[in-house]
Amino acid sequence: MKTVLKVIDDIVKYFLVLLVAVLSVLGIYQVIGRALGHAPAWTEESIRFLFVWASCVGAAVGIKEHIHIGIDVLVNLIPKLGRKIVAIAVQLILCCFDVFLLRAGILIMQKTANQPSPALRIPMSFVYMAVPVLGGLGLFYSIREIIKIIGEMKAKEEKENA
């Protein structure tokens, strides 16, 4: 099971790296194009769309890596068990938000399926697909975190009872 989870994590991270790499190359191309007096419109739109995707996938990875901003001052004042309970509560709140993103994102995708983007002429639903992807990945990582915390709590309890 851990191998499957690691493969999923690696796919998500490599996808994020690919997004940022393409975003960077297109950004350089756009700057050079402007300097030479010809900046294609499709690069600007591509950069914008890739930035949306990179932000959403990056936010999901942030959940897994615990790199989002948190307010630890109050949490650090409570005992360790209380911290675990707060951590689970935070993840449950994130799960609710992720479910909202999934549902709202799918609805937006359905409404924009026939709307082409101005320069690339791709359906805008491809751009808005980043929202339910964020919701799905966020839900996946939050549930994994809850399972991990509960496992740690059980392991500690078993260790104390032994």
Image: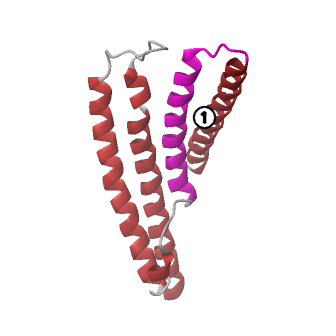
Percent position of residue 90, x then y: 39, 66
**The magenta stretch spans residue 136:** no
Describe residue 58's horizontal placement relative to residue 143 as left or right: right
SS type, badge 1 = helix
Point 45% across, 44% down: residue:
137
Percent position of residue 131, x then y: 40, 38
Percent position of residue 91, x then y: 40, 62
Q: Nearer the viewer, residue 158 or 38?
A: 38
Q: Nearer the viewer, residue 36 or 129?
A: 36
In this picture, is 51 found above or below 150? Answer: above
Q: Nearer the viewer, residue 13 or 140?
A: 13
Point 48% across, 14% down: residue:
119
**Quarter of image, res 50:** top right
Q: Pointer 1: residues within 10 angstroms few (<14), some, or many (20+)?
A: some
Describe residue 146's horizontal placement relative to residue 68 as left or right: left
Asked if residue 117 can be seen in this view, the reply is yes
Percent position of residue 117, x then y: 42, 17
Describe residue 30's horizontal placement relative to residue 115 as left or right: right
**The magenta stretch spans residue 56:** yes
Q: Amino acid at mark 1?
A: Phe
Point 58% across, 57% down: residue:
65
In this picture, is 69 found above or below 133? Answer: below
- The residue segment tinted magenta is 36-65
Describe residue 79's horizontal placement relative to residue 13 as left or right: left
Asked if residue 162 can be seen in this view, the reply is no
Type of secondary structure dominating the magenta stretch? helix
* Colour logic: secondary structure
Count of picture labels = 1
Question: Which residue, given by chain and number where applicable, does mark 1 sit on?
Answer: 15
In this picture, is 19 found above or below 99? Answer: above
Point 44% across, 12% down: residue:
121
